[in-house]
Amino acid sequence: MNQHTDFLSEISDFLYPRVPYYGQYKAEYLVFNAHLQEFSQRVNYICGLQTGGKISPEEAYKQIQILWKQLKMTKKQLLIHQ
């Protein structure tokens, strides 16, 4: 059972790599960074699907646009200003 758990942990680390946050320490920045990394990972998957011919360029664009709007909303909700 332990080998199974290790295997799943390795797959999870491969599919969802985590990068430590080194920026200014504020709770809202950490939350935004987590959302930003998730956005990046999902865009990467969408690009792979489109490149592999599994989804059309239009569908890829539409999905990325939705993710972008969600990221912008997160930024707005966290009151992060430029």
Image (spheres, helix red, strand yellow):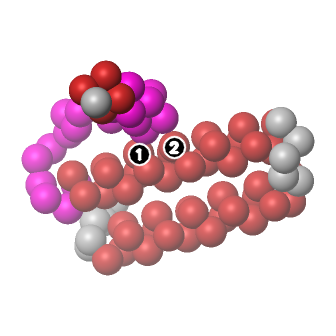
For the question of whether residue 19 can be seen, the reply is: no
Q: Which residue is mark 2?
A: 41
- Sort mark 2 into few (<14), some (14-19) or many (20+) by Cα contacts within 10 Å: some
Above or below, 34 against 22 in this view is below
State the count of labels: 2
| Magenta stretch contains residue 12 | yes
Please name the residue shown 51% across and 43% down the image: 41
Above or below, 5 against 42 in this view is above
Residue 38 falls left or right of residue 27? right
**Outermost residue toward the top in this view:** 3
Please name the residue shown 35% across and 29% down the image: 4
Secondary element at tag 1: helix
Residue 26 or 9: which is nearer the viewer?
A: 9
Point out the stretch of residues depicted in magenta. Answer: 6-29
Q: Which residue is mark 1?
A: 37
Residue 21 falls left or right of residue 12? left
**Outermost residue toward the front in this view:** 1
Above or below, 48 against 6 in this view is below
Please name the residue shown 61% across and 47% down the image: 43
Please name the residue shown 51% across and 45% down the image: 40
Question: Please, what is the three-letter code of the amino acid marked with disc 1?
Answer: Gln
> Mark 2 touching mark 1, by CB under 8 A?
yes
The alpha-carbon separation of the residues under discs 2 and 1 comes to 6 Å
| Magenta stretch contains residue 24 | yes
> What x and y, as percent, mark residue 74?
38, 70
